[in-house]
Image (cartoon, helix red, strand yellow):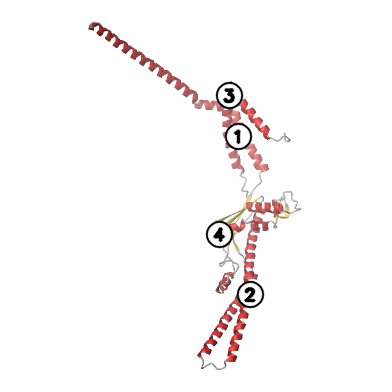
């Protein structure tokens, strides 16, 4: 083929390639524009505008208003007729650390290499553990209180456990329940060396009287403990006095026999040394015997000594207002909760109304399944 024809063919092929590329570019541009339009339409469909939200609220306005009203009315009914009022009475107390003279007596006993059955130092009272103990709670159950609901001078066990006011039989289970109820009423917090004692009760005067009785029981608990310690210490000292008296009498008899056998010992250093040993033994036992007698008298005084082991800084007072429930706060919170719940129900109702047949069928099926499962959970007799 002559070259001039080849050149003509090549030029035609170049022009054809250019036209093909231009057509492809235009086609791709058109396709991209179409895809962009589709994406924007999808975005607009999936995005909820402010006007749509306001429209939903306008359509479901009755539901949004009705739900908060219902929650507020239910809360008002609960705080007025169902919930029990709670009154709080407080007192500020501190321990006097009245351990008596037992620590001195224990120090004397330690000189003989003996230990008393109590601790070697004055007890440090931990009021939170004592007040929250079941021992003190059970003692409180026998105290009598006057209330408007249960009458005059009723035992605390009857007030807390026997709601009908009839105290016929007392069992260990009822005592355990009463002790747990007493512990739940009490709250104590330490602030340095003092304690803030708080009691919650259903009546203001009852709350004040409960704090007073609790402080009295706490004081009696410390007094009884110290009396038991002093009593054991007194028994120990009395036993030591009897033993020391016997040892002293033996030492005195030994010294008397030595003096009877040895009238003249001036010229005998060994006899003089032996006499000094007998005399020293008698002197030591005499000192021990005298000290024990003195401590015995001190212990007897401590046993009968009456003192306040609990120092009350701020005595309890009758609360003027109840602490719980707070009606206004509970109603406001119920209204806010109801408003949020009403908005959620409004969106659900709007979605269920405007959804297609398939979505409505799903809602109906879900509703029937929920009712069926609830029905299966209820026993046949209750049905």
Nearer-N-terminus badge (2/3): 2
Nearer-the-camera pick, 306 or 268:
268
Distance, label 4 to label 1, CA atoms, is 47 Å
Comparing 47 with 240, the one in front is 240
The answer to whether any part of residue 180 appears in the image is yes
On residue 194, the disc is 4
Residue under pointer 1: 68
Q: Which circle marks residue 239 in the picture?
A: 2
Q: Is residue 196 above or below residue 254?
A: above
Instruction: Label 3: state its secondary structure.
Output: helix
Instruction: Please identify the quarter of the rendering in which residue 19 is found.
Output: top left
Q: Position of residue 11 (x, y in %)?
A: 27, 9
Callout 2: 10 Å neighbours few (<14), some, many (20+)?
Answer: few
Q: Which element carries disc 1, helix, strand or loop?
A: helix
Q: Quadrant of the C terminus?
A: top right
Crowding near the residue tagged with mark 3, few <14, some 14–19, many ≥20 C-alpha atoms within 10 Å = some
- Considering every residue shown, the one lying at the far right of the view is 168
- Residue that carries the numbered disc 3 in the rendered image: 359
Residue at the spot x=40%, y=16% of the render?
Answer: 30
| Category of crowding for the residue at label 1, using alpha-carbon neighbours closer than 10 angstroms: few (below 14), some (14–19), many (at least 20) | many
């Amino acid at each position: 083929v002559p070259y001039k024809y080849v050149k003509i063919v090549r030029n035609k092929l170049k022009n054809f390639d250019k036209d093909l590329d231009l057509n492809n570019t235009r086609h791709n541009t058109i396709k991209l524009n179409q895809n962009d339009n589709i994406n924007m339409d999808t975005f607009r469909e999936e995005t909820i505008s402010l006007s749509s939200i306001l429209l939903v609220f306008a359509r479901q306005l009755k539901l949004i208003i009705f739900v908060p009203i219902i929650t507020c009315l239910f809360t008002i009914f609960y705080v007025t007729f169902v919930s029990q009022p709670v009154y709080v009475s407080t007192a500020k107390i501190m321990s006097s650390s009245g351990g008596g003279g037992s620590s001195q007596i224990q120090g004397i006993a330690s000189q003989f290499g003996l230990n008393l059955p109590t601790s070697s130092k004055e007890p440090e009272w931990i009021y939170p553990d004592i007040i929250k103990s079941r021992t003190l709670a059970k003692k409180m159950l026998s105290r009598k209180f006057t209330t408007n609901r249960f009458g005059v001078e009723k035992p605390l066990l009857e007030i807390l456990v026997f709601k009908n006011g009839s105290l016929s039989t007392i069992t260990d289970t009822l005592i355990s329940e009463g002790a747990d109820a007493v512990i739940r009423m009490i709250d104590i917090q330490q602030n340095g060396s003092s304690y803030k004692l708080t009691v919650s009760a259903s009546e203001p005067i009852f709350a004040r009287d409960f704090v007073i009785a609790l402080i009295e029981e706490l004081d009696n608990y410390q007094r009884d403990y110290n009396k038991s310690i002093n009593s054991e210490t007194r028994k120990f000292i009395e036993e030591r006095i009897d033993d020391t008296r016997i040892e002293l009498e033996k030492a005195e008899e030994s010294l008397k026999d030595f003096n009877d056998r040895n009238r003249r010992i001036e010229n005998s250093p060994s006899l003089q040394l032996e006499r000094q040993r007998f005399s020293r033994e008698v002197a030591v036992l005499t000192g021990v015997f005298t000290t024990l007698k003195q401590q015995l008298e001190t212990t007897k005084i401590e046993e009968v000594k009456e003192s306040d082991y609990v120092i009350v800084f701020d005595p309890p007072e009758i609360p003027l207002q109840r602490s719980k429930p707070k009606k206004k706060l509970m109603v406001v919170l119920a209204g806010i909760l109801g408003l949020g719940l009403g908005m959620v129900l409004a969106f659900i109702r709007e979605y269920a109304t405007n959804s297609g047949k398939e979505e409505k069928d799903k809602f109906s099926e879900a509703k029937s399944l929920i009712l069926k499962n609830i029905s299966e959970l209820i026993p046949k007799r209750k049905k």
